[in-house]
Amino acid sequence: MKKVISIAILVGMFGWIIYNQLSQNSFNQNSNETAFNIADKVSANSVIGLNTGDQAPDFELRTLSGETVKLSDYLGQRVMLNFWATWCPPCRAEMPDMEKFHQDKDVQILAVNLETSTQDIESFVKELNLSFPILLDKENIVASKYKIRPIPTSYMIDSNGIIQYKAFGPLNYEMMVQEFEKMK
């Protein structure tokens, strides 16, 4: 009996997780708008949030080299915002594709690291020869603001600062390019 109850609870938890993820990724059911034309209709009074079509929340972090960076500094440019850690195998796997994407396209990549040890991060960046900014969120303030659960998590933000796409889990080069080309 205990085994059946435990299985029922686990199935319920997984069902809730799937439902929660799907509902966060869905568009407004009362609208025929797609992610591609939402940004065209955003006004200066757009909603700040984490859903597709929302204005991405601004933040300020220091880079690995000590510079201060704000997301709002990149208005007018397309941005890939990525949350990651060196101990995360999927994060490690997507980094070479992110570097290639950064080199090939006119995109700004802001890679927000969620670790406290800069030595591990510096070694990793050097090993992969990463050239995009690595932002340090040692206290997970920005990760909390963006409600990051799984890592890697990525946001594609258009030149108006509007979230056009979000991904839970690693992206490959083709997926990055595909979503980038949909943005303005």
Image (cartoon, rainbow, N blue to C red):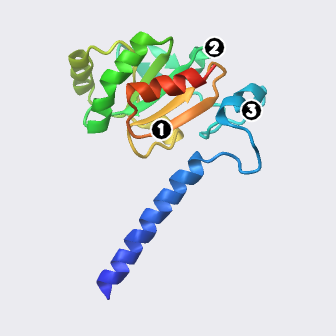
Q: Position of residue 111 (x, y in %)?
A: 41, 25
Q: Secondary structure at mark 3?
A: loop
Front position in the image: 110 or 21:
21
Q: Secondary structure at mark 1?
A: strand
Tag 1 and tag 2, C-beta contact below 8 Å: no
Q: Is residue 133 visible?
A: no
Which residue is painted at 31% across and 15% down in the image? 130
Nearest to viewer (mark 3 / mark 1): 1
The residue carrying pointer 2 sits among few (fewer than 14), some (14 to 19) or many (20 or more) residues within 10 Å by Cα, namely few
Check disc 3 and give the amino acid type.
Answer: Ser
Q: What residue would you read off at disc 3?
A: 46
Check disc 2 and give the amino acid type.
Answer: Gly
Q: What residue would you read off at disc 2?
A: 76
- In the visual, does 170 lie left or right of 164? left
Tag 3 and tag 1, C-beta contact below 8 Å: no
Nearest to viewer (mark 1 / mark 2): 1
Q: Quadrant of the C terminus?
A: top right
For residue 3, the mark is: none
- In the visual, does 94 lie left or right of 36? left
Q: Quadrant of the N terminus?
A: bottom left
Furthest-bottom residue in this view:
1
Which residue is painted at 43% across and 66% down in the image? 13
The residue carrying pointer 3 sits among few (fewer than 14), some (14 to 19) or many (20 or more) residues within 10 Å by Cα, namely some
Q: Position of residue 150 (x, y in %)?
A: 40, 45
Q: What residue would you read off at disc 1?
A: 167
